[in-house]
Image (cartoon, rainbow, N blue to C red):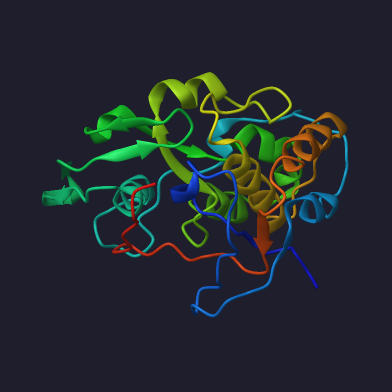
């Protein structure tokens, strides 16, 4: 079984739960998945190198389906607990969001950042430096898996910066299993490597998440997709 394009078993909506169920593939059919610990074992270990990194080498934010809503707006719409109103040029008003990193409820889209679960600099360090510009753009705007991008509070995202789990974990006590699952799934999906300290931390957290699984395939994020609150 290849895990190169896998997606995790729990969603961001399960961030207040210590365990998760296996998510189905995009067609809605259930997939067995593997344990989080086993998925971590599938991460290729390698040292990291940041030589040549520039944020501008990852193009943000696309409007791939030309509906007026760019990647940032698509994630905000998909992750809203209460769906915002869409105005001209996809201007979002109203709505509410739950930032699973810190448990905060936010009611203004400008209070949220769209976080790359595996930061752009970390992706560069662990394989993206060898990618084409087109592949880096796809990574930066990955709406085909609900594990790659997440709407979170400005403070939690900026506290995280470009750190990996060995250097930063979400402050919410309920977020650890979901965050590590998101991280592992995103790295496997994009065939990114992990360094020694990173894998050690991932394993440490996974030991507290015995029922969390990583599914064989990711879950697609659609423009009109709605989510239940945590």
- Residue 150 in picture, x, y percent from top left: 46, 43
Report the quarter where the N terminus lies: bottom right
- Residue 80 is left or right of residue 215, and the answer is left
Residue at image coords 69%, 45%: 209
- Residue 90 is left or right of residue 219, and the answer is left
- Residue 62 in picture, x, y percent from top left: 40, 51
Residue at image coords 60%, 49%: 19
Question: Of 203 and 219, which appears nearest the observer?
Answer: 203
- Residue 214 in picture, x, y percent from top left: 67, 59
Residue at image coords 59%, 40%: 179
Question: Of 90 and 77, which appears nearest the observer?
Answer: 77
- Taking 43 as reference, is 204 above or below it? above
- Taking 204 as reference, is 42 above or below it? below
When asked about the image quadrant of residue 6, the answer is: bottom right
Total marks placed? 0
- Taking 209 as reference, is 135 above or below it? below
- Residue 67 in picture, x, y percent from top left: 25, 62
Taking the view exactly as shown, the residue that stands out farthest to the left is 88
């Amino acid at each position: 079984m290849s895990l190169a394009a896998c997606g995790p078993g729990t969603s961001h909506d399960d961030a207040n739960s210590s365990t998760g169920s296996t998510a189905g593939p995009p067609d809605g059919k259930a997939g067995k998945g593997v344990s989080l610990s086993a998925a971590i074992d599938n991460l290729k270990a390698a040292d990291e190198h940041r030589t040549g990194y520039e944020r501008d080498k990852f193009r943000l934010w696309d409007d791939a389906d030309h509906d007026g809503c760019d990647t940032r707006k698509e994630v905000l719409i998909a992750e809203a607990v209460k769906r915002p109103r869409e105005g001209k040029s996809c201007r979002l008003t109203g709505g509410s969001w739950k930032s699973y990193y810190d448990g905060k409820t936010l009611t203004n889209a400008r209070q949220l950042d769209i976080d790359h679960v595996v930061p752009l600099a970390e992706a560069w360090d662990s394989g993206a430096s060898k990618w084409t510009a087109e592949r880096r753009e796809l990574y930066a705007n990955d709406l085909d898996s609900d594990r790659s991008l997440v709407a979170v509070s400005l403070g939690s995202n900026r506290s995280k910066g470009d750190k990996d789990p060995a250097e930063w974990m979400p402050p919410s006590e309920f977020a650890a299993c979901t965050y590590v699952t998101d991280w592992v799934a995103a790295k496997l999906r994009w065939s990114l490597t992990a360094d020694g300290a990173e894998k050690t931390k991932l394993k440490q957290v996974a030991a507290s998440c015995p029922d969390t699984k990583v599914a064989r395939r990711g879950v697609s994020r659609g423009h009109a997709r709605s989510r239940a609150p945590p």
